[in-house]
Amino acid sequence: MRKLAERKLLVATHNAGKLDEIRAMMAPHGIEVTSAGEMGLPEPVETEDTFIGNARIKARSAVEATGLPVLADDSGITVDGLDGAPGVYTADWAETPDGRDFMQAMTRTWRELDERGAPEPRTAQFRATLLLMWPDGHEEVFQGVAPGRLVWPPRGPHGHGYDPIFVPDGHDRTFAEMSADEKNAISHRADAFRKLEAALA
């Protein structure tokens, strides 16, 4: 992997929680992190049908605006009984006129599985793609996966998104029933981050 000559990295996100997570991961490597949100950059429209494609859109937009190396990510859940849906449209399934409602998205997912007569276990995977792009367009991609199954009804007060109905392989609790530290040790994003960290080391 190409090394970061400058120890500065822009993260293409407007999500403060995601920024804190990445900032903590980069600190041991002496890499200073800022975000697209902190710099007031607009959020580009994601028009691709793959996680890599949408991460590339976010990275390229931020690179062109700042001239800095950029880390972008795209993530979602793929449900085997729905032929991989919602996938890159995970957040879209939660959209309402008043913002995102993931109970709506989870309910739709379970209803569609019922309508198809999908058998148990209803397997699914959380997927994360990290894309590191340099100003000259060079890029490195790191992908992480957390396999598991869906359950109903939703369980647990923690996490976000589909966490209340997702039980990772080897466990009997949903992501939303785990502490942040427990989840982050086995999550799809942690898997991708470990690969990125190994490349930076």
Image: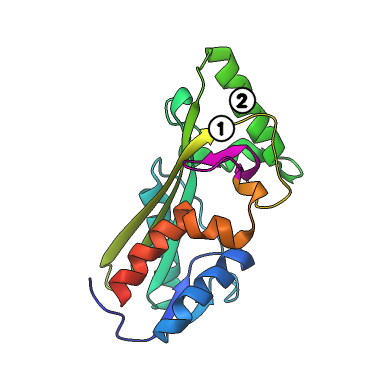
Task: Kindly identify the amino acid type of the residue bearing the numbered disc 1.
Answer: Leu
* Identity of the residue drawn at 41% across and 44% down: 48
Task: Kindly identify the amino acid type of the residue bearing the numbered disc 2.
Answer: Trp
Q: Position of residue 46 (x, y in %)?
A: 48, 49
Within-10-Å neighbours for mark 1: few <14, some 14–19, many 20+ = many
Residue bearing mark 1: 150
The C terminus appears in which quarter of the rendering?
bottom left
Q: Is the residue under label 1 in contact with that under label 2 (CB below 8 Å)?
A: yes
The N terminus appears in which quarter of the rendering?
bottom left
Q: Position of residue 189 (x, y in %)?
A: 46, 57
Residue farthest toward the left in the current orientation of the protein:
1
Residue bearing mark 2: 110
Q: Position of residue 143 (x, y in %)?
A: 35, 54
Q: Which residues are magenta?
A: 162-174
Membership of 169 in magenta stretch: yes
Q: Position of residue 54 (x, y in %)?
A: 42, 51
What kind of element bears circle 2? helix
Front in this rendered view, residue 1 or 38: 1
